[in-house]
Image (spheres, rainbow, N blue to C red):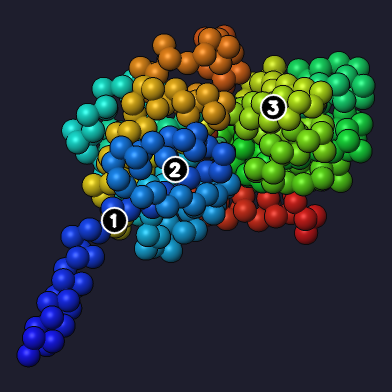
C-alpha cells in the first residue's frame, strides 16, 4: 500500500512539475548577420525566455514558409514590399503598440515610410533600414579600374565588369534589388512592373552573368573580407561587416561601400508576428526589448545597419552616425527610392526572368 502511494505521488509530482517549471520559449526567424549575438543572451538572462534563432538570407525563403502556414515562428523580419503582400495574404497578425512600453522610441519618419507598405502601421515595426550599393576591395579596384567605384556603370556595364571578373564579382540573389537598380540605371522607373521594362533590365543583367562568380545574398561578407572577391552588389551593413571582419583578422584587405551617383534602392526590414505565433507574450517582450535605445544601438554597432529607433541615435558611435552610407543625410536621401510590391502575375514574370538572368535558361 505504502509503495502504491509513493508511486502515485511520484507520478502526480512528475506530471505536474514539468508544467510548473515550463521553459518559456521564443522562436525567431531573422536575416543572417543581423543582430548582436550578446543581445539574445542578455534577453534570455533578463527574462528567462529561451530563444531559438533561425536565419535566412532571402525574402523569398521567408515568404515560402509564411505562405505555407504554421511556421512555428513568433517573430519574422520581412522587407517592406514583402510585408505588404503578407499582410494582404493574412499570414501576419496586428501588433498592439499599446502593449509595448518602448513604442515611444520608434522613429516617426521611418515609421511614416513603413506606413506606405503597412497602412496605419498596424502589422510591423521597423528593425533596420538600408541601401543596396557596391562593396569593393579598394586596392584591387584601383589596380584594375584605376579609380574607385562611383557609378553603377562600374558594376552594371560589361566593359567595366569584365575587368573585375578574374578577381571575383558577387551579386545579390534578390530580384527585387537587382531589378530596381537596373531599371534605375537604364533611366526607367525603378518601380516599373511593365513586362517590357522588366525584360530590358533582365537583358542588362543577363549580359553580366559571365562575369559574375555567384548570385548570393550572404556569402559575400566573408568572401570580401577574405579577399576572395573584389566587388559585390550588396547591402550597406553587410559591407561594413566585411570591412570589420578583415580589420579584426588583421588583414590588409580594405573594403569600401558606395551608394553610386545615380542613386539606389532604400529598403526597410521589419519585425512582424505570424498569425499562428505560438508564443505571443514572448514575442511582444522581445520586440519591446529591441526597441530599447541601448539594445538598438548595440545591434547597429554589430551589424552596420541603421535601426528604426530614433532614441538610439545619441548612443551610436559618431563614425557610424555620421557616415551617410549608413545613416544617409538629406543630400543622399534625395538619391534614394523605394519600390512597391509586385502583384502575383508580376511576381511570376520577375521570378521567371530572374532565373533566366542567373542560368541563361
Ligand atoms: C542582413 C541582411 C539584411 C538586409 N545580413 C536585407 N534584408
Q: Crowding near pointer 2: few (<14 within 10 Å), some, many (20+)?
A: many
Q: Give the number of the mark in front: 2 or 3.
A: 3
Q: Which residue is under mark 3?
A: 248
| Residue that carries the numbered disc 1 in the rendered image | 23
In this view, the residue in front, 273 or 8, is: 8
Residue at mark 2: C-beta within 8 A of ligand 1: yes
Q: CA distance from mark 3 to mark 1?
A: 37 Å
Q: Would you call the spot at circle 3 few (<14 residues within 10 Å), some (14-19), or many (20 or more)?
A: few
Q: Residue at x 71, y 38 (%)?
A: 222
Q: Is residue 80 visible?
A: no
* Mark 3 element type: helix
Q: Quadrant of the C terminus?
A: bottom right
Q: Residue at x 23, y 33 (%)?
A: 100
Q: Name the image quarter holding residue 257.
A: top right
Residue under the image location 31 percent in, 22 percent down: 105
- Name the residue carrying label 2: 77
**Secondary element at image label 2:** loop
Instruction: Locate residue 252: give its quadrant.
Output: top right
Amino acid at each position: 500500500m505504502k509503495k502504491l502511494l509513493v508511486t502515485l505521488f511520484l507520478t502526480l509530482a512528475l506530471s505536474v512539475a514539468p508544467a510548473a517549471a515550463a521553459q518559456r520559449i521564443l522562436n525567431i526567424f531573422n536575416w543572417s548577420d543581423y543582430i548582436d549575438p550578446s543581445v539574445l543572451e542578455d534577453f534570455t538572462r533578463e527574462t528567462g525566455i529561451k530563444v531559438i534563432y533561425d536565419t535566412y538570407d532571402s525574402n523569398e525563403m521567408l515568404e515560402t514558409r509564411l505562405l505555407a502556414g504554421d511556421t512555428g515562428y513568433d517573430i519574422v523580419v520581412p522587407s517592406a514590399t514583402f510585408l505588404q503582400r503578407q499582410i494582404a495574404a493574412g499570414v501576419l497578425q496586428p501588433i498592439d503598440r499599446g502593449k509595448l512600453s518602448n513604442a515611444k522610441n520608434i522613429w516617426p519618419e521611418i515609421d511614416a515610410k513603413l506606413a506606405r507598405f503597412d497602412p496605419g502601421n498596424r502589422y510591423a515595426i521597423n528593425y533596420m533600414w538600408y541601401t543596396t550599393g557596391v562593396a569593393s576591395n579598394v586596392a584591387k579596384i584601383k589596380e584594375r579600374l584605376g579609380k574607385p567605384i562611383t557609378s553603377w556603370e562600374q558594376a552594371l556595364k560589361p566593359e567595366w565588369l569584365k575587368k573585375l571578373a578574374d578577381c571575383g564579382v558577387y551579386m545579390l540573389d534578390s530580384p527585387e534589388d537587382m531589378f530596381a537598380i537596373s531599371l534605375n540605371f537604364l533611366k526607367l522607373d525603378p518601380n516599373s512592373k511593365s513586362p517590357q521594362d522588366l525584360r530590358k533590365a533582365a537583358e542588362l543583367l543577363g549580359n553580366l552573368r559571365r562575369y559574375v562568380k555567384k548570385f548570393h545574398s550572404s556569402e559575400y561578407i566573408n568572401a570580401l573580407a577574405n579577399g576572395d572577391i573584389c566587388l559585390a552588389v550588396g547591402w550597406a551593413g553587410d559591407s561594413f561587416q566585411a570591412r570589420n571582419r578583415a580589420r579584426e583578422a588583421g588583414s590588409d584587405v580594405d573594403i569600401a561601400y558606395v551608394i553610386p551617383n545615380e542613386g539606389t534602392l532604400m529598403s526597410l526590414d521589419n519585425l512582424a508576428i505570424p498569425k499562428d505565433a505560438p508564443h505571443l507574450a514572448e514575442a511582444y517582450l522581445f520586440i519591446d526589448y529591441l526597441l530599447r535605445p541601448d539594445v538598438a544601438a548595440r545591434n547597429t554597432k554589430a551589424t552596420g545597419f541603421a535601426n528604426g529607433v530614433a532614441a538610439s541615435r545619441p548612443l551610436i558611435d559618431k563614425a557610424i552616425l555620421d557616415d551617410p552610407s549608413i545613416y544617409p543625410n538629406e543630400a543622399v536621401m534625395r538619391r534614394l527610392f523605394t519600390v512597391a510590391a509586385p502583384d502575383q502575375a508580376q511576381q511570376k514574370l520577375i521570378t521567371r526572368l530572374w532565373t533566366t538572368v542567373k542560368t541563361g535558361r
